[in-house]
Image: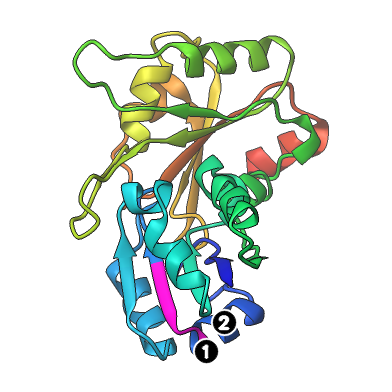
Amino acid sequence: MLSLVGLGIGDGKSIAVEGLDLIKNAKHIFIENYTAEISANKLEWLQNEANSEITVLSREEVEEPNLLLDKAKDSDVVLLVEGDPLSATTHNSLKNQCKSNQIEFNVVHGSSILTIAAGLVGLQHYKFGPTATLVMREGNYEPKSPLEKIKANIEHGYHTLVLLDIKKDNPEEKGKTMSATEGLQQISQEIDNENLACVIERAGYNDSKVIVGKICDLINLKFGETPHSIIIPGDLHFAEKEAIEQL
């Protein structure tokens, strides 16, 4: 059996009891940290809870999961994923491949920035439009579609959750994570700088913080340790205005 276990976000201790039981009993435990950076402290805590060695997998080893599938045919295998494991299409693909290979498949869901960001700022979930993901520039590669999503959401009065890119080719090395400053610099090229923005620092951690201001003001700030995410609000309900004013 292959079990995808969501770690939630933060220090890892928000993992579901069911997920913790699985890592205590699984014969093979793997973790991917390319969809989100797994901190060394979190990995150490997980290893202390597990009865088997936790092996870090590269993107290629998850997207071409021969190792995972081979072991899951005969034993209990756990793949640990930051946040909620089926938020990424790669992990949905694993579900389909298990079905094709007649391997039992199990999911333990976890909290995600997709589910908690609105509550951290005090916005209403149903007023969000499509999520936008900003990517780091590489040469001439500078996609505009994420900025077009933000513009379209603003035009319709919707809020936008903006996720920030992470580059991690070697699973044993620390990746480069886009900061809120870099994200705001991209956003400022296409979005009115007088618009409000909400920067969320380290969602799920004890030192999580939300900073609210106009894009033109926030773009000059130095933010704390990553991970960061950004919300660009659309039309605000009076209750949302009150929540943002308190921030």
Between 207 and 13, the residue placed more toward the observer is: 13
Q: Position of residue 168 (x, y in %)?
A: 26, 45
Please say if the residues under marks 2 and 1 sit with CB atoms less than 8 Å apart.
yes
Q: Does residue 173 show up?
A: yes
Q: Which region of the structure is painted magenta?
A: 25-30
- The secondary structure type at the circle numbered 1 is helix
As for residue 40 lying within the magenta part, the answer is: no
Q: Where, by quadrant of the figure, is residue 67 drawn?
A: bottom left
Residue, x 21% and y 54% (percent of image)?
A: 174
Where the C terminus falls, by quadrant?
Answer: top right
Q: Which residue is mark 2?
A: 22
Residue, x 57% and y 51% (percent of image)?
A: 97
Residue, x 43% and y 55% (percent of image)?
A: 202
Q: Position of residue 44 (x, y in %)?
A: 32, 79
Residue 19 lies left or right of residue 128; in this view the side is left
Q: Which residue is mark 1?
A: 25
| Type of the residue with mark 2 | Leu
- Alpha-carbon span between mark 2 and mark 1: 5 Å
